[in-house]
Image (cartoon, rainbow, N blue to C red):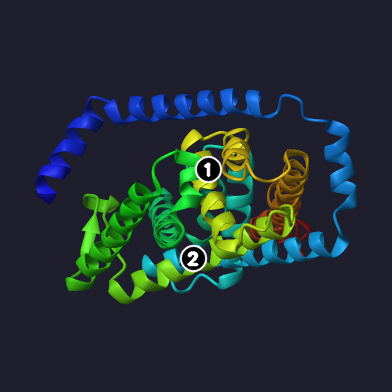
Amino acid sequence: MLEAIRRAISFLRQRQILHRLGVAVSVTVIGIACYVLYHMLRGIDVDEVIEAIKQTEPHQIALAALFVAAGYFTLTFYDLFAVRAIGRADIPYRVNALAAFTSYSIGHNVGASVFTGGAVRYRIYSAWGLNAIDVAKICFLAGLTFWLGNAAVLGLGIAYHPEAATAIDQLPPWLNRLVAFAIILGLLAYVVWVWMRPRGVGRGPWTVTLPGGPLTLLQIAIGIVDLGFCALAMYVLVPDEPNLGFVVVAVIFVAATLLGFASHSPGGLGVFDAAMLVGLWQMDREDLLAGMLLFRVLYYLAPFVISVILLTFREVILGARNKRLRQAASLLEAEPKREAAFVRERRDTGA
């Protein structure tokens, strides 16, 4: 069965069918989102949205910012886990934290996070002797942690409250609950599969050894905590009335986030917003838009600015350090020449 799946994937890659399918999915998702946004935003009073932002309590914004910070802190463990999994326990946590925070915050905003985040990671980890293959493995394992967490949150959330997913996909609640159980069973099957014996994916130097059962459970826990904090930040900022409950908001938030990733648009712009507006249709649109704009400032814009500043300072410091090293090397190279010139001068003067 697994060999047949591998052959099918290999065939699709050779014919570039997977690439074309991915582009088609992205274009389709973005097109649907634009259509939905056009109809949802008609009649929106911009002044009311601005007023709703102004009326947001400072403690709500502070609490949401705290949850966002906690979410990004949890993201640092994605890289810590991945780097340890490829056998590089010598790289300190501060480097993992910098790589995770900057790669995710820049990738979220620029889009195509697999490539942009990978480029940022490579710039940081290459200073510690990691090559492109090592960084690709880190990206794969970090992405695996993210998707395992998403599967767990979506499966458990939809199984508990299938009506939340119905608001987005328009499927009957019983069918959504059935899908949720399938996701949970698939997740359990994966955990059992990697628990039975060591598993790997890829070939040759690109082979990645998958974490075993206990470490996979840790991966799932990290992903759940990360998404939980992000969903809490959004829950704090959405309107209080009607109070739909945290689980409903969390399920819709995670589903909207995944649709945003599928579109590859920067920050899921348009796609994430359309899904949130459709999923939380019971809420006042102006108030909901105000909360979503504040969330974007806290989760996307602020971390992006901080990341650019951190990377700029890092490059300046590395540049100054390399300059000092080059100067020291040139002095060491010039020292024997000065000694030889001194000897020749003494010999010529008869000293």
- Residue at (56%, 33%) from the top-left corner? 265
Identify the secondary structure beneath mark 2: helix
At label 2, the amino acid type is Ile
**Upstream in sequence: badge 1 or badge 2:** 1
Near-viewer residue (92 or 129): 92
Q: Is residue 122 above or below residue 40?
A: below
Near mark 1 (Cα within 10 A), the count class, few <14, some 14-19 or many ≥20, is many
Q: CA distance from mark 1 to mark 2?
A: 20 Å
Residue 279's quadrant in the figure? Answer: top right
The quadrant holding residue 350 is: bottom right
Closer to the camera in the image, 86 or 326: 86
For the C terminus, the quadrant is bottom right
Looking at the image, residue 253 lies above or below residue 272: below
Along the horizontal axis of the image, is 74 left or right of 29? right
Residue that label 2 marks = 224
Q: Position of residue 302 (x, y in %)?
A: 75, 51
Give the SS element for disc 1.
helix
Question: What's the mark number on residue 113?
Answer: 1
Residue 323 left/right relative to 79: right
Residue at 57% across, 67% down: 74
Q: Amino acid at mark 1?
A: Ser
